[in-house]
Image: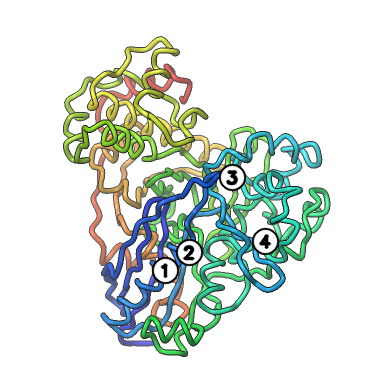
Amino acid sequence: MTGTLSFAAVDLGATSGRVILGRVGPDSLGLTEAHRFPNTPVRLPDGLHWDVLALYQGVLDGLRAAARADGVASVGVDTWAVDYGLLDADGALLGQPYHYRDGRTEGAAKRVWAKAGPEELHAVSGLQHLPFNTVYQLEAARGSAQLAAARTLLLIPDLLVHWLTGAVGAEETNASTTGLLDARTGAWSAALLDRLGIDPALLPPLRRPGEPAGTLLPHVAEYTGLAAATPVTTVASHDTASAVAAVPATEPGFAYISCGTWSLAGLELDAPVLTEESRAANFTNERGIDGTVRYLRNIMGMWLLEECRRTWAAQGSPAALSDLLAEAAREEPFGALVDPDAPEFLPPGDMPARIRSFCRRTGQRVPESRGAVVRCILESLALAHRRTLRQAAALAGREIRTVHLVGGGSRNELLCRLTADATGLPVVAGPAEATALGNVLVQARAHGLVPDRAAMRRLVAATQPLRRYEPRGDRAAWDAAAARIGVA
């Protein structure tokens, strides 16, 4: 197909949602933000929830803005992973979905392991152990009136697609984060569901990126101003899968870091790595587009810095990110380091105090100034990136020549430089909007504008601003810093 078409990408993150309008032609690719809205969790008496109704209204308003700006050929939806809504027999939502940072899953993993041990779970699903994986959330919900009344489970992007189209399905890249999908076959694991006592009827049929999900319901088309026949295209609905689809790699031997609230660092493979060594290293095998495997590890990411800024603002000392990074750049290297994946950093709260407590407990100099805290965070993340990519390469038997750092973290020049220095590899930073680009490009491919995954990536590389950082600095100093906190 020739010519240019516009696609609406619904992209929901942990702190905000956007509807992005992407215009794609054979040699052109551009994004415009049609609408942005906050994603503010709500704490109810029974725990922390997503305000999914407010998010859905934001989606509708965003599609309305997109319709005013241009003709929309298709709509695609991506969000974060693991969280879900439950529908009753009439298709009504049973309460607001739980937030993955809610504490209800404490102890759930041990109850699951009593039925199927961690080795068996990994052998089937290939997933990294995270306490909030869907399999553990369902265990936490066991015996509840809500789960007893449920007839359908829809992950968050599938729930939004259902409300837009009336169709029911489970997109496979997000389904692969539940712990219930067979990593080898790409199907729901009947044997695992039986062992865990989960009703298979809860889980809808699987859909692949690029397949049609349905068309807008009449009332949705009327409200948004989009054509009644506007299709909703299944995209890689796990936001990281969309981001990886837009990595601008044109040569083999690349690794990626999708850096935002979380840093997802790893490789794109043709088959899962299900060895005991991989499980012990806590790597995950999640699905990407075209049957690929995102072999990666979750790292706590810019959440640490976001929570620090939130704490400082609440204490009456708000700070622009640019000012904090300038302060951090002036601090002495390796003054203090933390393991970003330490469990005390997962919940919301006073992150500067937790970082100081970690440093005090490990016998390090305690970072007192804001610049020292930020320097600690960024160097610690760079070391975590280094550890994860080295482990991924060793476990998968791959050589890494270039690291592509995409997402919001690619705008953080200091983090990009530190990651290049820590890994000893060139870092190509950008695009910052990788998730929206991947969403749009899967839609564009479904409409015949780009032929394959390689062409998608070439188009990103040719049209989006990228910056290359060569490694420099003292390798021995980075080795010593890694050894200090056991992330070598």
Q: Is residue 455 among the parts visible in the rendering?
A: no
Question: Does the residue at mark 2 contact the one at mark 1 (Cβ under 8 Å)?
Answer: yes
Mark 1, residue position = 57
Q: Residue at x 49, y 87 (%)?
A: 218
The correct choice, above or below, for 460 with respect to 264 in the image is below
Residue type at mark 4 is: Gly
Secondary structure under tag 2 reads helix
Q: Residues within 10 Å of mark 4 (few under 14, many from 20)?
A: some
Estimate the x, y position of residue 233 in percent, counting from the top left.
Answer: 49, 76
Q: Residues within 10 Å of mark 1 (few under 14, many from 20)?
A: few
Identify the disc placed on residue 186: 4
Quick check: 299 above or below 360? below
- Residue at image x 81%, y 41%? 115
Dot 1 or dot 4, earlier in sequence? 1
Residue drawn at (49%, 48%), measured in percent from left and top? 267
In the drawing, what numbered circle is on residue 457? none
Measured Cα–Cα span from mark 4 to mark 2: 31 Å
Q: Earlier in the sequence, mark 4 or mark 2?
A: 2
Residue 474, percent from left and from top: 28, 23
In the displayed structure, does residue 125 sit left or right of residue 174? right
Between discs 2 and 3, the one toward the N terminus: 3
The answer to whether 128 appears left or right of 27 in the picture is right
Distance, label 1 to label 4, CA atoms, is 33 Å
Mark in front: 4 vs 2 = 2
Q: Secondary structure at mark 1?
A: helix
Residue position for label 2: 53
Identify the residue at horizontal 45%, vertical 72% (top origin): 76
Q: Amino acid at mark 2?
A: Leu
Residue 108 figure quarter:
top right
